[in-house]
Image (tube, rainbow, N blue to C red):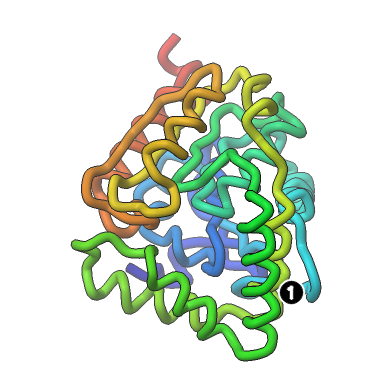
Amino acid sequence: MALAYDDYDDYDDHHDAGSGDCVVLIHGHPFDRTLWDPQVTALRDSFRVLVPDLRGFGRSPVTPGRVTMRELAADIEELLDGLGIARAALVGLSMGGLVTMELAIARPERYWAIALVATTAEPPSPGEREVRYARAEAIERDGIGVLLDYMHTGLYGPACPPAVRARVDAMMAAAPPAGAAAALRGRAERPDYRPLLARLDVPALVLAGTADPWSTKAVTDEIAASLRRPELVVIDGVGHLPNLEAEREFNDALRAFLVTHAPGQVNEAR
């Protein structure tokens, strides 16, 4: 679904909706902030929902070459600082999960909960690193269709609604090739987050679908095993975009997790 602009404050590089404890929704690659439209609708009555366009996507400027996950995290830190938001929860899907880990590991006291959706905590293998760099070069040379062809090999679950496929395909096709390539190179340089996650004493929702060929059961279980306070949710038959393929089930799980751990909700219950 798409939100009307009068449903929230819409800025060049982010959406800002609702009020209360802040929740930051961080999209994956090669998407933009509109990936989270159904979640904005589901959460804005209870939370302040901040939805940025990561650098190189949507309305954010493109930095050619390479953009690391740490740089994307720093952009979000700067946004939070500029808005005077001292504490927040983070929800990251796929590459957004990598950015979420970067943020939480760097300043764990700032984030009251995290959700890692269809992502990984493991570093790329040497072979994967080479493939990502080669694909980035092909995207810059031949266009974003190169990336769409690859994404179509595993993005959608077998029962993904045609309307979701159409919307996401259009979103990916609109991604700037230079931005997509730069982030792809940055993902190729991601660290091993597993020993770093073990330091976090924060509630962490780990969520994936059983039909995701990238964030598999083994990958997802490895994330949960690396965390001190994991809450694991697996949605049957869903691919790499559980927030869209299983919108109601995803929203229910995410909202219940956030309500349970939000500072304002906890204080009201006392």
Residue 233, image quadrant? top left
75 left or right, relative to 217? right
Instruction: Say what amino acid the circle numbered 1 marks.
Output: Pro
- Front residue of 85 and 187: 187
State the residue at coordinates (50%, 51%): 93
Return the residue nearer the eye: 148 or 266: 148
Q: Residue at x 62, y 90 (%)?
A: 142
Residue 147 horizontal/vertical position (percent): 53, 76
Q: Is residue 211 left or right of residue 169?
A: left
Q: Residue 237 appears at what percent x and percent y?
A: 22, 50
In the picture provided, is 102 more to the left or to the right than 173? right
Rendered-image quadrant of the N terminus: bottom left
Q: Residues within 10 Å of mark 1 (few under 14, many from 20)?
A: some
What is the residue that sits farthest to the front in this orientation?
Answer: 127
Question: Residue at the location (19% across, 62% down)?
Answer: 159
Residue shown at 55%/23% (left/top)? 227
Please tell me which residue lies in front, 109 or 221: 221
In the rendered view, tell whether residue 213 sits above or below residue 7: above
Quadrant position of the C terminus in the picture = top left
Q: What is the count of numbered marks?
A: 1
- The residue at which mark 1 appears reads as 61
Q: Secondary structure at mark 1?
A: loop
Answer whether residue 110 is visible to the viewer in this image. yes
- Residue 244 drawn at (x, y percent): 33, 59
Residue 92's place in the image compared with 180, above or below, is above
